Image (cartoon, helix red, strand yellow):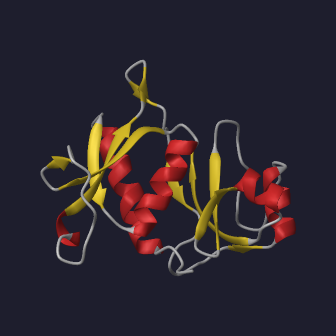
Amino acid sequence: MKQASLVTLSHLLAHMKNCINITLAKTSVPYNRTNLQALLQLYNQGFVSGIQRGSTSGPDLVPTEATPENISTRRLWVDIKYRNNASVISGLSMVSKPSKKVELSVDDIRLLAAGLRVRRVDPIQPAECLFIENNGELFEVAEAAKRGLSGRALFRVK
């Protein structure tokens, strides 16, 4: 499996931060595997309320597949979740960076899931998620610990 691009992921997180700062309810990001996996994890953890395929002009009314001919116009439309006029996301940050990748063993992930600090990675706080990549798939740290996976720490959301 192909690994997630850290540059693409950092662009996604910066875009999401900017949208949250101006309280934008819906935004679009380029349609690619890295963005799709990250947004699906954010959706599964309850940080975003919806994801739709679409184009540069808006979400699709009729489902359209991405092809090599139209991939440049394909977008993922994200509904950012708000509660009491405040985003449920209070912080997004990269753990691994292109110049400093943070690889974690199975034991490291178990310690993180238990709430302990591991090397450069701060412990997880309540209502915070840390995402791990293993063989091209993204997992929340508790799920990775339960499955006994190792991998790269990508980003955290609170």
Would you say residue 117 is visible in this rendering? Answer: no
The total of numbered circles placed on residues is 0
Q: Is 77 situated above or below 33? A: above
Q: Is 52 situated above or below 7? A: above
Measured as percent of width and height from the top left, residue 81 is found at 42, 32
Residue 155 placement: quadrant: bottom right
Q: Name the residue furthest left.
A: 57
Which residue is found at the position 47% from the left and 73% from the top? 6
Q: Nearer the viewer, residue 110 or 138?
A: 138
Left or right relative to 80: residue 135: right
Would you say residue 73 is visible in this rendering? Answer: yes
Left or right relative to 3: residue 60: left
Measured as percent of width and height from the top left, residue 32 is found at 36, 67
Left or right relative to 79: residue 68: left
Q: Is 127 situated above or below 108? A: above
Left or right relative to 153: residue 109: right
Residue 128 placement: quadrant: top right
Which residue is found at the position 81% from the left and 48% from the top? 115
Measured as percent of width and height from the top left, residue 75 is found at 26, 58
Measured as percent of width and height from the top left, residue 51 is found at 38, 45
Which residue is found at the position 50% from the left and 39% from the top? 47
Quadrant of the rendering where the C terminus is positioned: top right
Q: Nearer the viewer, residue 147 or 130?
A: 147
Quadrant of the rendering where the N terminus is positioned: bottom right
